[in-house]
Amino acid sequence: MSQKGILAVVSGFSGAGKGTLMKALLERYAQQYALSISATTRKPRVGEEHGREYFFLEKDAFEQLIAEDALIEHACYVGNYYGTPKSYVLEQMEAGRDVILEIEIQGALEVKKKFPETLLLFVTPPSAKELESRLRGRGTETEAVIRDRLSRAVEEAEFMEQYDYILVNDDLDTCVQDMHRLIQAQHQRCSENRDFIRQMKQELNEL
């Protein structure tokens, strides 16, 4: 059977624990997954490295990638471009690794349009109250920022039904297992096994 990698896109509310979830999944199944690295035109922050946190590019180099259709998705936030380089994702998938993109909803839906087989996962806490509690628990944001994130969550919730699966991040360990199980199940889809199906049909006809 073909063991080409699966493309999975993870989105969710700010405060849902996506970053922690990704880190735990990658630590537990290091050989199986590759976390896609985005390209950006923003300057590196202290401690960030090119090719680790982001591919840091000049604006003209990024616009060249757009012109060449070399990005799976891209957007402009606060004057800087962000996008997912296609070559990195396809190389990892060809090597048999499942690639995870952690991106915003708009980007996720753009990826699904270009690659219909993409698995869309939406991460959420068990309740709105818990989401608020986690945002406040960070202790790093002002009341205005917290209110802004909560009102943004109201808008984002409108898109939840466009995702394939909802992952309720209540217990981290359970959520990691659920995410791994859902992604691995995609390898059994008929669309991922066309060569095997073709071979089986041929063998049966030859009996």
Image: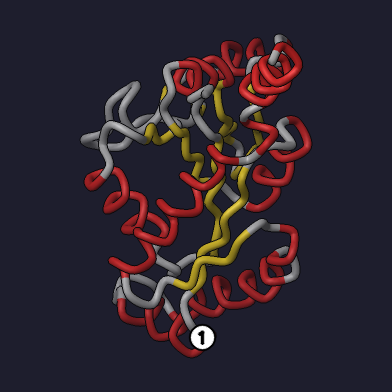
Q: How many marks?
A: 1
Tell me, what colour scheme is on the image? secondary structure
Q: Residue at x 73, y 66 (%)?
A: 161
Is residue 126 depicted above or below 191 in this figure?
below
SS at mark 1 in the image: loop
Residue 173's x, y, as percent?
28, 66
Residue 7, picture quadrant = top right
Q: Residue at x 58, y 20 (%)?
A: 86
Residue 78's x, y, as percent?
59, 44
Position of 41 with respect to 195 (left or right) is left
Is residue 29 depicted above or below 204 in this figure?
below
Residue situated in front as seen by the camera: 163 or 180: 180
Residue situated in front as seen by the camera: 75 or 87: 87
Residue 142, picture quadrant = bottom left
Is residue 125 depicted above or below 44 in this figure?
below
Residue 201's x, y, as percent?
73, 21
Q: Residue at x 67, y 76 (%)?
A: 154
Position of 102 with respect to 49 (left or right) is right
Q: Residue furthest bottom?
A: 129
Residue under numbered circle 1: 127
Q: Sort mark 1 into few (<14), some (14-19) or many (20+) by Cα contacts within 10 Å.
A: few
Quarter in which the C terminus is drawn: top right
Position of 137 with respect to 179 (left or right) is left
Q: Residue at x 71, y 11 (%)?
A: 206
Is residue 59 depicted above or below 32 in this figure?
above
Residue 24's x, y, as percent?
27, 53
Amino acid type at circle 1 is: Ser
Q: Residue furthest front?
A: 207
